[in-house]
Image: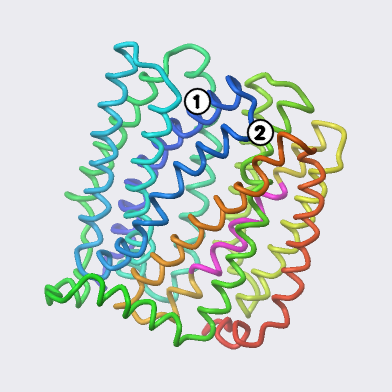
């Protein structure tokens, strides 16, 4: 670990901020376009599947790559591939080829790039951060993600109302180019041991080794089982609330922007709280509290009749995510062997990319036949119960105790 680690971390976070900003502008523009033009739960489900299935299939390989090769170059290469794809689609749209299948295809390709990036980013952060600072750096990263999520819907909404989609796509390309330049020229990342050795063995052998490692760690198995159920249950609140708002409170773009802004403000506060406070002495206690509160907020979103109160609850639900994600990520980073970090995070990404679409396969089509409010009430109760049960998970509680 080099002595000037703060400079490295700041520059890395700046590069990721730019990359996230461009990607978020595109993501919101496409999502809103489909929501407002179709108002269909089935259409949203199809779009979301296109955005998750590539991540599911690529994540195990991406985890191996993150353990074998330079994590910095993996992040840059995936950003570049997404940018090239975005340019091609922008040119097609400018030429008049405007169809939902093109947007779905772009979503799938971008998801593949994100599937490569995710494990590499989570495995790279411990490479440039002292262990005792991991909670603060991960909390700062969550805060940055929240700030981007706050800014991007407003910016995307303004652009969406005034300019064609291809303009937003070209902005994404520009931010990606600057992010790649910063990452490759200014950020110094020590090459981890397995990347230095070249690792000539089989990819599938490395992948199986990762699965065997996970199977041999009781706390990882327990955590992944928790996440699998949580991701399925969180599908309605994660993806169907814009459709709920369009149906119940109005289909104007400002309604959709408002809920994203409210959630993002909450995430900023939650990320700042996670970075400054660090959570309870046992990280699992913080995760349990966040899960319980998230479930309660999901329940409340299904029963409140007033849009102003709905926004306040949405903001509170945003606070809970960094309070869960920060200690959960650090728990993995602190306890998993360094040479296995990429593979473990790869499987975690695969889990999320499988369970969230699975949840949408169940709840998405139901949204065309039953009320979204009823789904939020039911899943909110179940997630709150998950949070309570997490407090009795001895395996996770044992590894959740902070060293300092």
In the rendered structure, find residue 200 and report the number of the disc placed on it.
Answer: none
Counting from the top left corner in percent of width and height, residue 225 is at 58, 72
Quarter occupied by the N terminus: bottom left
Q: Is residue 166 above or below residue 272?
A: above
Counting from the top left corner in percent of width and height, residue 345 is at 41, 67
Q: How far apart are marks 2 and 1 (CA)?
A: 17 Å
Q: Is residue 137 above or below residue 245?
A: below
Label 2 neighbourhood size at 10 Å, few (<14), some (14-19), many (20+)? many
Quarter of the image where one finds residue 119: bottom left
Q: Give the range drawn in magenta.
A: 316-329
**Residue tagged 2:** 242
Q: Judging from the image, what secondary structure is the residue with disc 1 in?
A: helix
Does the magenta run of residues contain 320?
yes
Question: What residue is drawn where x is 27% and y is 65%?
Answer: 66
Compared across the picture, whether 398 is left or right of 378 comes to left
Residue in front for this viewpoint, 207 or 403: 207
**Residue tagged 1:** 155
Q: Is residue 114 above or below residue 189?
A: above
Does the magenta run of residues contain 161?
no
Compared across the picture, whether 179 is left or right of 54 comes to left
Q: Judging from the image, what secondary structure is the residue with disc 2 in?
A: helix
Quarter of the image where one finds residue 95: top left
Residue in front for this viewpoint, 65 or 215: 215
Question: What residue is drawn where x is 71% and y is 41%?
Answer: 366
Sequence-first tag of 2 and 1 = 1
Compared across the picture, whether 224 is left or right of 337 comes to right
């Amino acid at each position: 670990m080099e002595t000037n680690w703060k400079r490295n971390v700041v520059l890395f976070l700046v590069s990721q901020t730019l990359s996230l900003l461009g990607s978020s502008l595109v993501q919101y523009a496409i999502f809103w376009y489909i929501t407002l033009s179709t108002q269909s739960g089935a259409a949203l489900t199809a779009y979301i599947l296109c955005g998750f299935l590539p991540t599911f299939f690529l994540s195990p390989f991406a985890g191996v790559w993150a353990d074998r090769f330079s994590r910095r170059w993996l992040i840059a290469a995936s950003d570049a591939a997404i940018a090239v794809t975005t340019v091609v689609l922008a040119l097609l749209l400018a030429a008049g080829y405007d169809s939902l299948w093109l947007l779905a295809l772009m979503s799938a390709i971008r998801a593949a790039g994100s599937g490569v990036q995710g494990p590499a980013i989570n495995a790279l952060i411990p490479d440039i951060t002292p262990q005792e600072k991991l909670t603060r750096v991960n909390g700062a990263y969550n805060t940055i993600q929240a700030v981007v999520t706050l800014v991007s819907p407003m910016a995307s909404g303004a652009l969406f109302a005034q300019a064609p989609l291809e303009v937003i796509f070209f902005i994404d390309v520009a931010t990606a180019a600057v992010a790649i330049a910063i990452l490759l020229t200014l950020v110094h990342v020590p090459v981890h041991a397995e990347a230095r050795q070249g690792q000539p063995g089989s990819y599938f052998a490395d992948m199986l080794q990762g699965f065997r490692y996970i199977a041999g760690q009781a706390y990882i198995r327990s955590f992944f089982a928790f996440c699998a159920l949580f991701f399925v249950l969180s599908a309605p609140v994660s993806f169907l609330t814009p459709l709920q708002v369009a149906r119940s409170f109005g289909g104007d773009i400002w309604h959709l922007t408002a809920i994203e802004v409210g959630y993002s403000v909450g995430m900023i506060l939650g990320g700042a709280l996670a970075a400054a406070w660090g959570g309870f002495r046992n990280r699992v206690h913080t995760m349990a509290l966040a899960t319980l509160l998230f479930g309660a907020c999901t329940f409340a979103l299904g029963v409140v009749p007033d849009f102003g109160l709905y926004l306040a609850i949405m903001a509170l639900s945003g606070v809970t995510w960094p309070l869960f994600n920060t200690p959960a990520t650090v728990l993995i980073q602190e306890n998993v062997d360094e040479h296995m970090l990429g593979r473990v995070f790869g499987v975690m990404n695969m889990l999320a990319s499988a369970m969230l679409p699975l949840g949408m396969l169940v709840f998405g089509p139901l949204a065309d036949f039953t009320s979204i409010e009823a789904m939020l009430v039911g899943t909110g109760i179940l997630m709150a119960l998950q949070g309570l049960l997490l407090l009795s998970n001895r395996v996770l509680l044992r590894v959740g105790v902070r060293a300092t």
